Amino acid sequence: MLDTSQNIRRQTTGALVTGLVFGVGFFAWTALMPLDGAVTASGLVALENSVKKVQHQTGGIVGQIFVREGARVKEGALLVKLDDTTTRANLGIILNDLVAGKARLARLVSERDQLAKVVFPDELTKRAVLSTEVRSALENELKLFENRVKSRDGQRQQLKERIGQLRQELGGLATQRQSIDEQLRVAREELADLKGLQAKGLVQRPRITALDREVARNEGVLGDVIARTAASMGKIAEVELQIVQIDRDMVTEVSKDFRETETKISELNEKRVAADDQLRRVEITAPISGIVQQLQIHTVGGVVSPSDPLMLIVPDGDQLIVEVRLQPQDRDQIKFEQDTRVRFSSFNQRTTPELNATVFRISGDVVRDAQSGAYYYTVGVRVPDRELVKLNGAKLVPGMPADAFFKTDTRTLLSYLLKPLTDHWQTTFTGR
């Protein structure tokens, strides 16, 4: 009985010692054994340079097609030319309006400065030699200038003639006044003499009354002459002001027209720039060198809607990369040129190894998935050609799924096991 109890005690002690040794060994292994850390992200095989979509901002009618599906083109090569009939017609109208506006502006400046003739810019006079439209615009403004000058000169002449007539009237009134003044002087002297004789009883009263009446009548006539003289002088002053007003009205009208013409020329210049740009864009060229795919236009005369895709240009000889979506919480562990391993899940995993790669591009901000609403960073991973050889002839195609494993700092198993607990403690104490 005693031996059995001792055996049990020895077995229990041995088990405890063995467990303790195993536990201490396991703890030492977890604390000392290094493990490579990695961040995992999934994505797709893609072209390093995106496929270029060929569009036209304003659209139009197809005039010529220079490429076909699958054609290889160089950057800048002419792909499609839109019909430019309407665009050229619009540009011609704008250019003609510009010439007319500049010619009008030159005529207004000549009128404002009261020049004897219109001084046109050298640009217009040189173009008038070769262009019937320009020459016609200059001739129209020159005729208008001459007609307006003649009209103002005619108005001035009429007013000056009116002033001449009024001055003749003033001359007649002055003569009439001189005659009346003389008649009054004689009548007043005679009246004074008669009044002296009347006092002596030598002249009868009726004769003096008649002479008084004649003096009063002449004084009335004199007052009328003076009033008419003042009226005529006032009319002369008024007509002289009308002559001055002709030039003032001309300056006011010309200044208004000048501002309006300058504004119109400025607007036409903007339209000309837009029309020139639109004319240049009737020739649609290749944005990059590559292969034409998904050609959407096949018929001359077809309508191209604004911003509709006409074709795609797949970059020629572009390198394939892996583009993955990285979770925002892992962003601080990823850096440029970071060592990465890539696995292509489309291939046989037993015969296809993981390939070494490096990070060469990281998006500057998070991107939001339109469907799920999740946020992520886009990370570009490049696989060197020497690694692609390991695929043993397997061909990568854009759109294939791929997984990237970003190598991070080496850590022990114990640190992995304790990290959730230490993070929780840190959050708790920080919150306090």
Image: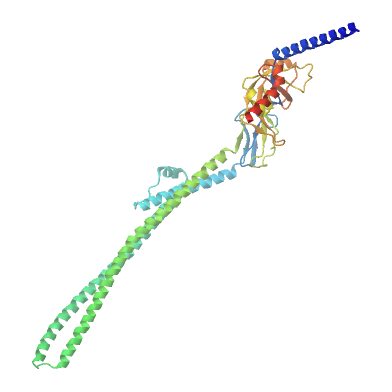
Tell me residue 346's x, y (percent): 77, 23
- In the picture, residue 190 is in which quadrant? bottom left
Tell me where residue 125 appears, x and y as whole percent.
41, 44
Can see residue 133? no
Instruction: Determine which quarter of the picture holds residue 7.
Output: top right
Q: Is residue 431 above or below residue 303?
A: above
Judge left or right: residue 293 versus residue 156: right
Q: Is residue 391 visible?
A: yes
Q: Residue furthest front?
A: 2
Residue at position x 49%, y 44% from top? 269
Is 147 on the left or on the right of 19, as rendered? left
Residue beneath the point at 53% across and 47% down: 93
145 vs 21, nearest the viewer: 21
Query: Please, which colouring scheme is shown?
Result: rainbow
Q: Position of residue 348 (x, y in %)?
A: 79, 19
Outermost residue toward the right in this view: 1
Q: Is residue 118 left or right of residue 165?
A: right
